């Protein structure tokens, strides 16, 4: 018997949910607390990565295209997906969110931020949409030789979920060289600390959108985070960005 579209989608959602649920979330939370980022996976298969990267030339799945050099963002380009999102992306968003909401709520409590996040991603998106942020924010990025992404923060409105994720869809060393994911952390009265995060195909890095708490000798303080991508030296690099709040 041929599976229906709905049954195939449910099966796929179940597979993604099972992969996410099988991760050691206690260890992931510990990495986020200690270092400001955590690498998980590979969570997507090479076939899933290649299928997502292959969407880039099309127009239909996307709502807009950004040429980074036109805005001083760096070099390269990216496209924001339109609703409804491709199944794998929607499923990753739904499966990752509740685990990250637990960390986000704890972080906000530690930093004295009053905002709290609901257990389900659908409830959080309802909050975004009611506040005038209805546009989906997951995006597909494409870099070629000489391209890079300047250090930045993905803030799209009043509602900002504190954590986001990036999935490397290409094969480092085979599809491209260079193009390392980077994080910087600005602590009060200190110079910025930089961290380069190596990824393999299908791996996901989770990191702060804006701030994270750090334990100091005089208690907890808030540090400012930015992320970017170093220069691609050769080849083509595709990544998937998963942001959990929507945009204006």
Image (spheres, rainbow, N blue to C red):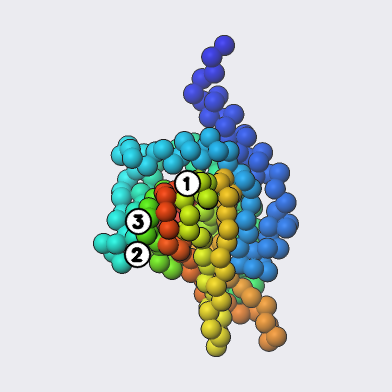
Residue receiving disc 3: 76
- Does residue 209 appear left or right of residue 103 in this picture? left
Q: Nearer the viewer, residue 119 or 11?
A: 11
**Disc 3 element:** loop
The alpha-carbon separation of the residues under discs 3 and 1 comes to 16 Å
Spatial distance from mark 2 to mark 3, Cα to Cα?
A: 9 Å
For disc 1, the marked residue is 175
Tell us which disc is closer to us: 2 or 3: 3
Q: Position of residue 15 (x, y in %)?
A: 62, 34
Which class describes the residues within 10 Å of circle 1: few (<14), some (14-19), or many (20+)? few
Disc 2 residue crowd, few under 14, some 14–19, many 20+, Cα 10 Å: some
The answer to whether the residue labelled 3 contacts the one labelled 1, judged by CB atoms less than 8 Å apart, is no
| Sequence-first tag of 3 and 1 | 3
Q: Toward which corner of the image does residue 219 lie, by quadrant?
A: bottom right
| Residue at the disc numbered 2 | 73
Write the residue at 48% across / 55% down. Answer: 177
Mark 2 touching mark 3, by CB under 8 A? no
Q: Nearer the viewer, mark 2 or mark 1?
A: 1
Q: Residue at x 68, y 63 (%)?
A: 31
Earlier in the chain: of badge 2 and badge 1, it is: 2
């Amino acid at each position: 018997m041929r599976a229906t579209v709905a049954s195939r989608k449910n099966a796929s959602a179940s597979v993604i949910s099972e992969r996410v649920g099988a991760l050691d979330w206690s260890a992931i939370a510990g990495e986020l607390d200690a270092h400001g980022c955590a690498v998980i996976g590979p969570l997507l298969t090479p076939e899933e990565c290649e299928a997502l990267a292959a969407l880039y030339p099309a127009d239909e799945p996307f709502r807009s295209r950004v040429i980074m050099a036109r805005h001083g963002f760096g070099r390269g380009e990216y496209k924001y997906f339109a609703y409804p999102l491709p199944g794998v992306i929607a499923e990753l968003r739904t499966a990752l969110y509740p685990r990250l909401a637990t960390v986000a709520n704890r972080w906000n409590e530690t930093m004295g931020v009053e905002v709290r996040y609901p257990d389900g991603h659908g409830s959080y998106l309802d909050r975004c949409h009611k506040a005038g942020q209805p546009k989906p924010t997951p995006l597909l990025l494409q870099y070629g030789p000489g391209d890079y992404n300047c250090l930045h923060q993905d803030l799209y409105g009043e509602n900002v979920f504190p954590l986001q994720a990036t999935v490397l869809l290409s094969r480092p060393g085979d599809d491209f060289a260079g193009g390392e994911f980077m994080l910087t952390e600005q602590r009060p009265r200190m110079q910025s600390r930089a961290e380069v995060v190596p990824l393999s195909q299908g791996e996901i890095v989770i990191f702060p959108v804006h701030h994270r708490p750090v334990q100091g000798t005089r208690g907890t303080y808030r540090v400012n985070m930015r992320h970017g991508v170093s220069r691609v030296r050769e080849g083509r690099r595709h990544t998937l960005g998963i942001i959990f709040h929507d945009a204006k």
